[in-house]
Image (cartoon, coloured by chain):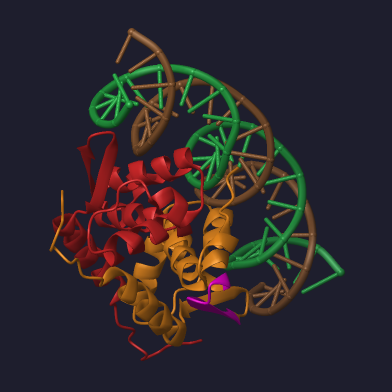
Chain colours: A red, B orange, C green, D brown
Amino acid sequence: MGLAKTEMFTDQQNEISLFAKVFGHPARVAILQHLFKIERCVCGDLVSEIGLAQPTISQHLKELKYLGLIKGNVEGTSVCYCIDSENWLKMKEVMIQFLDQDISEKENCC
Amino acid sequence: MGLAKTEMFTDQQNEISLFAKVFGHPARVAILQHLFKIERCVCGDLVSEIGLAQPTISQHLKELKYLGLIKGNVEGTSVCYCIDSENWLKMKEVMIQFLDQDISEKENCC
DNA sequence: AATATTAATCGTAATATTGCAATGAACTAA
DNA sequence: TTAGTTCATTGCAATATTACGATTAATATT
């Protein structure tokens, strides 16, 4: 059905999967890495930087914005995007807590 | 087109997005958390634990196995799954390196 | 051998995602 | 005003994902 049954999982599990999902496309990873890398805010050059069509980039940016990971600022005809550092930090904590689990090797059968 | 143009991204970006994608469903997050939590390997009780049909769980397990994050061991009629700790660690490094980027707040316009 | 148990696979329906051409909206420059 | 720039939105086609019933394969039990 292509639809996750979110109601049967915890809020934490759903939150983790939502964050992970947005990182589940290399274009969005590339956009975020670019936003981290450059010293100033990026404006329109993401299209030439990434190599996808403008509507496609716009759509990816929308998803990143929806989750609060980036902010957009209108500057004349162009829009300036950058990482929302506060929300990025919150996301990071959630994700790292999930990733950083330790295995009790005690009775590992595999 | 529903298909990521992986050839235009770096190996690292593709790797990150592949790992992230597998965490992009709450059932797989739940399966992994359960495998971490229990002291011994889970076998068939994931179906009752998670609450999805057996073929669905089996499919999710297959994806986790494909990425190397879990291992499966046949034990009679049942199969015993557990975290592949070595690969989990490798994945963790890749993901944390991506998540742990710092923002140069210098000329942040937003 | 006959039956039961467990999990994988197949087939299929429903929905989601990705990508882009075309268009629209907002501003700028001439 | 007119034309240009930049980015968002719409609409659509192609593909992917999710879920599960039905079936199959493999082993256990009787």
Front-lying residue, B6 or A67? B6
Q: Quadrant of the N terminus of chain B?
A: top right
Q: Is residue A107 magenta?
A: no
Does A110 sit above or below residue D9?
Answer: below
Q: Is residue D13 left or right of residue A64?
A: right
Does B37 sit above or below residue B28?
Answer: below
Front-lying residue, A40 or B63? A40
State the image coordinates of residue B79 (x, y, percent, origin top left): 57, 75
Which residue is pictured at 22% across the width and 37% down the height?
A74
The part of the chain drawn in magenta is B66-74
Front-lying residue, A67 or A1? A67
Which residue is pictured at 32% across the width and 48% down the height?
A64
| Observer able to see residue B26 | no
Does A65 sit above or below residue A16?
Answer: above
State the image coordinates of residue D19 (x, y, percent, origin top left): 52, 46
State the image coordinates of residue B27 (x, y, percent, origin top left): 42, 57
Location of residue B16 (image quadrant): bottom left
State the image coordinates of residue A81 (x, y, percent, origin top left): 26, 48
| Observer able to see residue B73 | yes
